[in-house]
Amino acid sequence: MDQVPASTSKYQYVRGAFPAVLPPGDRFDLVVALAVVEHIPEKDQPGFAGACLAALRDGGRVVITVPSSRVDDILKVLKAIRVVDGMADHQHYGFNPLNAIAVFERAGFKLERHSRFQLGLNNLLVFRKPTSA
C-alpha cells in the first residue's frame, strides 16, 4: 500500500486491491476507478459500487471511466488483423456504460455527470453520495 504521509499533504493516496487496502474506519472524499469497472464480473459490480459508497463521506464522489461497447468491436477487428495481441477475450464482452450507471444508482449514488471522450469511445461517469438527512 503506497500512501503519501499526512505530514506532507492533505491528500491521502491509497493504492492496492479495493476495498481491502483501505485504512479501517477512514472515509474518503473521492474514489477513482479508471478503466476498472468493465473488468469486474457483472455479478460482482454491485458489491464494488456498495464498497465505494461505504468508503465515501457524505457528499463524496466516485469517478469512473468505462469504454463504449463499440470498443470491443474495434478490438475484435484489430485482433483479427493481428494489430493487437494478448487481450483477455472474457474481459471484452460488450460492456454497456448504462449498466454501470444503473449499478451505481442502485447502490445509492446520484449521477452528476456523464460525458464521452476519445471520439465517443470512452465514458466519464461522476457519481455523488447523497448527504444524510
Image (cartoon, grey):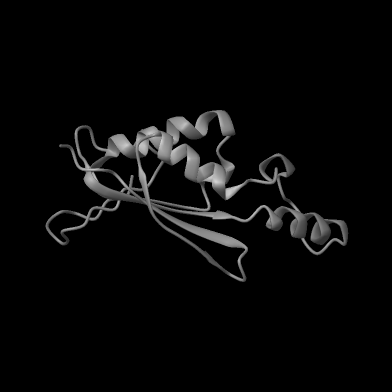
> Where is the N terminus found, in terms of image quarters?
top left
Front residue of 113/85: it is 113
Residue sitting nearer the eye, 80 or 120:
120
Q: Residue at x 20, y 42 (%)?
A: 131
List x then y, in percent, for residue 69: 67, 52
Give whichever of 1, 58 is nearer the camera: 58
Which residue lies most toward the left here?
7
Q: Residue at coordinates 58% horizontally, 43% vertically from top-left?
A: 39
For this orientation, the residue located farthest to the front is 133
Look at the picture and state if 33 lies above or below 132: below
- State the residue lying farthest toward the right: 81
Residue 34 spot, x, y in % from top left:
47, 54
Q: Is residue 85 left or right of residue 95?
A: right
Q: Is residue 79 left or right of residue 1?
A: right
Indicate the position of residue 25 as horizontal and vertical percent values. Answer: 19, 33
Q: Which x, y percent locates residue 62? A: 36, 49
Of the pair 46 and 5, the residue shown nearer to us = 46
Q: Using residue 128 as the reference point, say whether residue 122 is left or right of it.
A: right
Hey, which residue is sitting farthest bottom in the picture? 119
At 48% from the left edge and 45% from the top edge, which residue is drawn?
101
Image-based side of 38 in relation to 15, left or right: right
Residue at 76% across, 60% down:
74
- Count up the numbered dots: 0
- Above or below, 68 relative to 58: below
In which quadrant of the rendered image does the C terminus lie? top left
- In this rendering, is residue 107 above or below 15? above
